[in-house]
Amino acid sequence: MTKQNTKTKITDIEEQIKKLKEKQKRILTNSQRDIGKYLMDIWGIEDVSEAKVLIDLFKDQVKVYNEVASSNEGTEKDETNN
């Protein structure tokens, strides 16, 4: 009886994990779709190829911006801890 109960619990947990992974995938897909739609709307672009070209053009600037923002966050945290 205990073996069956343990096996059932394990199966239930595995099923929950599977459902959560599916939910995670849906959330990621929806957020990527929303971000893409937002970029195309805000930039006034209708062509996907054009959007990809612009993203490629701006990617280095975005990387630099993120690095600066990350280093500023670290500095701000250090200052608040003192």
Image (cartoon, rainbow, N blue to C red):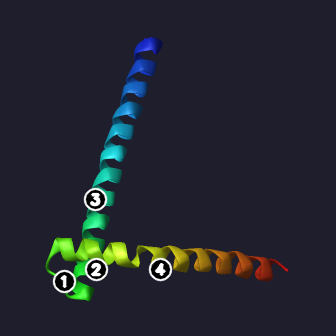
**N-terminal-most mark, 2 or 4:** 2
Pointer 3 residue: 29
Q: Where in the figure is residue 3, as x and y percent of width and height? A: 45, 12
Q: On residue 61, which mark appears?
A: 4
Structural distance between the alpha carbons of marks 3 and 2? 15 Å
Would residue 45 be found to the left or right of residue 32 on screen? left
Helix, strand or loop status at disc 1: loop
Structural distance between the alpha carbons of marks 2 and 4? 16 Å
Would residue 26 be found to the left or right of residue 67 on screen? left
Number of other residues with Cα within 10 Å of mark 4, as a class: few under 14, some 14 to 19, many 20 or more: few
Badge nearest the viewer, 1 or 3: 1
Badge nearest the viewer, 3 or 2: 2
Q: Amino acid at mark 4?
A: Gln
Q: Where in the figure is residue 62, as x and y percent of width and height? A: 46, 77
User: Looking at the rendering, which quadrant does residue 46 occupy?
Assistant: bottom left
Q: Residue furthest right?
A: 82
Pointer 1 residue: 45
Would residue 77 be found to the left or right of residue 50 on screen? right
Helix, strand or loop status at disc 2: helix
Q: Where in the figure is residue 78, as x and y percent of width and height? A: 78, 77
Badge nearest the viewer, 1 or 2: 1
